């Protein structure tokens, strides 16, 4: 869930009253939010960087509020206050937005050329007129852009927002794409002109912008927006031009959103416009549903008129239709999360108050059961712990090196699911085996008294083209024994105990047995494949010395790795 930081005193001033921390926490809960933390800029810096760095930082109290991921209209102070004021019925009706033509006559135009299809094909734009920025409003305006970039815009890959001082440029505007060496302008907060190629090199060391370079750097053409005089407004999704930058003195703001997803671009533009003025580019849409539908789904018994009032509290203007049963609900552009009648029903329940809904006994009686796989897992965990092994819980994501190079395997043979554009080298793929996590746990605890006995029963992820998502989860059991001697007999004994618990007797056909096998992760001649009911379920053996050294271990280690799903 996104977290919005707002200054407490500024929030209370906008709401028109002061709350205690407990009262505001309760208000947030009623509105479907969560007051996550009460802190200050000084406390945050002190906690993250130390007291020395925090000297001179602001002591102003900040509320950190968790908002639902699909409520983009609550990502700034303005939207948060507006929603709470309507919820508390401080506004008679929720705001109604409309598009207004400029007094000068013709509206501004943004012309999209066909060259953009090769890199970023969509663009939408709007103008905010006669705005008065204070420092707080300006900061909130910039912060909303960043929140949207990180949320619905997916770090600018889907949508990139550009804001410009309209009085410094002139339309019509042209959105096109050109070879990087043909684009030349002075970027934001720079004093000289650069070509697009030079900018990409310049920003490779920039802590903020370098994360977005990959979006277009391999493209033959880069997107760019010009005004009628050939002045560059922006090179999305990287940087705006310095010429049209906004300031506290800006009165008219030109907002452009370039995108690979047109629907997301419209949502983002609506958020930027509606949060900072009462006008909107898009008209309202309407949804019709019955009061009986909401009563049945929520579990309440309210009149149609009362339900319409509840929905209006949630910024959804609602009126009872002439038949007295149906409710016509206006969906404002701020509520892009409403895509079905169920979303309206959820808002009605929120406005009614979840704590006010009377608990009732379900009409249909069912008996709940634990999933068989999870039940088997829990039973095995208890007995493995009783056998003297300590349970570990390791990350489901790991590096390619962990499941391939360190285990002396080829990454192409692992059936691994790769993370697109991973944030760190430690989390590049979903694990295909539990063994690397346990070996890293051993490395972190190698100063503990020997022997070390660890186990884990968790899911791994494997590519599977037969599944609709192209991959599947597989529940596995892995155990390691680390000591001055390999302890193969300990791991073998643990396998026998597991089979005893699973009521599988030794035998070649209906039982279990092991036979010699070759595996690059294990010492030659010290590896066995495990068969149960005639099928291979895993391996056990003494790990190869190169594997042990690559995980920064110095003692011999034996391991067991089996699939437990066949025993359900």
Image (cartoon, rainbow, N blue to C red):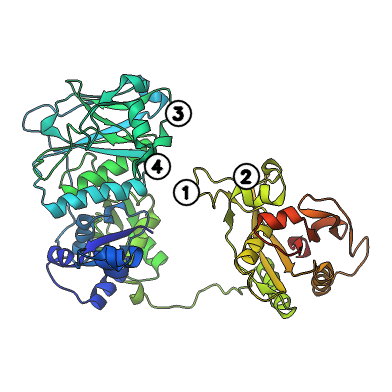
Instruction: Name the residue carrying label 4.
Output: 211
Residue 54, image quadrant: bottom left
Name of the residue lying farthest toward the bottom:
386
Q: CA distance from mark 4 to mark 3?
A: 14 Å
Q: Earlier in the sequence, mark 1 or mark 2?
A: 1
Front residue (pair 103, 511): 511
Instruction: Name the residue carrying label 3.
Output: 218
Quadrant holding the N terminus: bottom left
- Residue appearing at x 44%, y 78% in the figure: 360
Where disc 1 sits, the SS reads loop
Mark toward the viewer: 4 or 2: 4
Front residue (pair 341, 492): 492
Residue 509, image quadrant: bottom right
Name of the residue lying farthest toward the left:
103
Relative image position of residue 408 (x, y in whole percent): 72, 48
Residue 388, image quadrant: bottom right
Q: CA distance from mark 2 to mark 3?
A: 27 Å
Where disc 4 sits, the SS reads helix
Name of the residue lying farthest toward the right:
508
Instruction: Name the residue carrying label 2.
Output: 470
Total numbered labels = 4
Confirm or deny contact between disc 1 and disc 2 (CB under 8 A): no
Q: Is residue 301 left or right of residue 399?
A: left
Front residue (pair 267, 51): 51
Q: Tell me if mark 1 has few (under 14), some (14-19) or many (20+) residues whose alpha carbon lies within 10 angstroms of its own.
A: few
Confirm or deny contact between disc 1 and disc 3 (CB under 8 A): no
Relative image position of residue 407 (x, y in whole percent): 70, 51
Mark toward the viewer: 2 or 3: 3
Q: Earlier in the sequence, mark 2 or mark 3?
A: 3
- Residue 423 is labelled as 1
């Amino acid at each position: 869930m996104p977290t919005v930081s707002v200054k407490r005193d500024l929030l209370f001033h906008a709401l028109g009253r002061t709350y205690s921390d407990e009262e505001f926490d309760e208000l947030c809960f009623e509105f479907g939010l969560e007051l996550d933390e009460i802190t200050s800029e000084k406390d945050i810096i002190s906690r993250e960087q130390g007291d020395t760095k925090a000297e001179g930082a602001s002591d102003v109290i900040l509320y950190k509020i968790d908002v639902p991921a699909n409520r983009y209209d609550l990502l700034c102070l303005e939207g948060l206050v507006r929603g709470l004021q309507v919820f508390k019925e401080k506004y008679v009706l929720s705001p109604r937005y409309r598009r207004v033509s400029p007094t000068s006559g013709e509206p501004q135009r943004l012309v999209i050329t066909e060259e953009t299809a090769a890199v970023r094909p969509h663009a939408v734009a709007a103008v905010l007129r006669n705005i008065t920025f204070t420092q707080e409003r300006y900061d909130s305006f910039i912060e909303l852009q960043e929140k949207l970039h990180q949320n619905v815009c997916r770090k600018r890959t889907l949508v990139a927002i550009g804001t410009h001082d309209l009085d410094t440029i002139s339309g019509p505007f042209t959105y096109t794409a050109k070879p990087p060496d043909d684009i030349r302008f002075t970027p934001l907060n720079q004093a000289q002109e650069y070509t697009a190629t030079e900018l990409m090199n310049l920003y490779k060391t920039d802590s903020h912008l370098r994360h977005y370079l990959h979006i277009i750097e391999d493209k033959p053409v880069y997107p760019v927006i010009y005004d009628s005089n050939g002045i560059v407004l922006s090179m999305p999704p990287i940087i705006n031009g310095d010429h049209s930058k906004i300031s506290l003195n800006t009165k008219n703001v030109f907002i452009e959103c370039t995108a690979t997803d047109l629907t997301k671009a419209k949502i983002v533009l609506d958020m930027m416009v509606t949060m900072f003025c009462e006008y909107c580019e898009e008209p309202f849409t309407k949804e019709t549903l019955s009061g009986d539908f909401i009563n049945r789904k929520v579990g309440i018994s309210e009149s149609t008129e009362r339900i319409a009032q509840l929905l209006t509290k949630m910024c959804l203007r609602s009126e009872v239709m002439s038949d007295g049963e149906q409710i016509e609900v206006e969906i404002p552009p701020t509520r892009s999360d409403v895509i079905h009648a169920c979303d309206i029903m959820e808002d009605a329940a929120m406005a009614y108050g979840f704590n006010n809904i009377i608990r009732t006994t379900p009409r249909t009686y069912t008996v709940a059961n634990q999933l068989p796989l999870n039940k088997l897992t829990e039973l095995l965990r208890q007995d493995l712990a009783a056998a003297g092994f300590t349970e570990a819980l390791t990350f489901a994501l790991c590096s390619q090196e962990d499941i391939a190079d360190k285990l002396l395997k080829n990454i192409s043979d692992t059936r691994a699911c790769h993370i697109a554009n991973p944030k760190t080298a430690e989390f590049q793929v979903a694990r295909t085996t539990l063994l690397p996590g346990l070996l890293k746990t051993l490395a972190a605890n190698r100063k503990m008294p020997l022997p070390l006995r660890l186990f884990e029963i968790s899911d791994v992820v494997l590519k599977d083209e037969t599944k609709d998502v192209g991959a599947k989860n597989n529940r596995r059991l892995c155990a390691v024994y680390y000591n001055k001697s390999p302890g193969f007999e300990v791991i073998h004994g643990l396998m026998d105990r597991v089979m005893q618990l699973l009521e599988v007797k030794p035998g070649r056909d209906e039982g279990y047995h092991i036979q010699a096998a070759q595996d690059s992760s294990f010492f030659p001649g010290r590896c066995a494949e495990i068969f149960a009911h005639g099928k291979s379920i895993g391996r056990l053996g003494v790990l190869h010395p190169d594997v042990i050294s690559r995980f920064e271990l110095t003692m011999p280690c034996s391991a067991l790795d089996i699939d437990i799903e066949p025993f359900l």
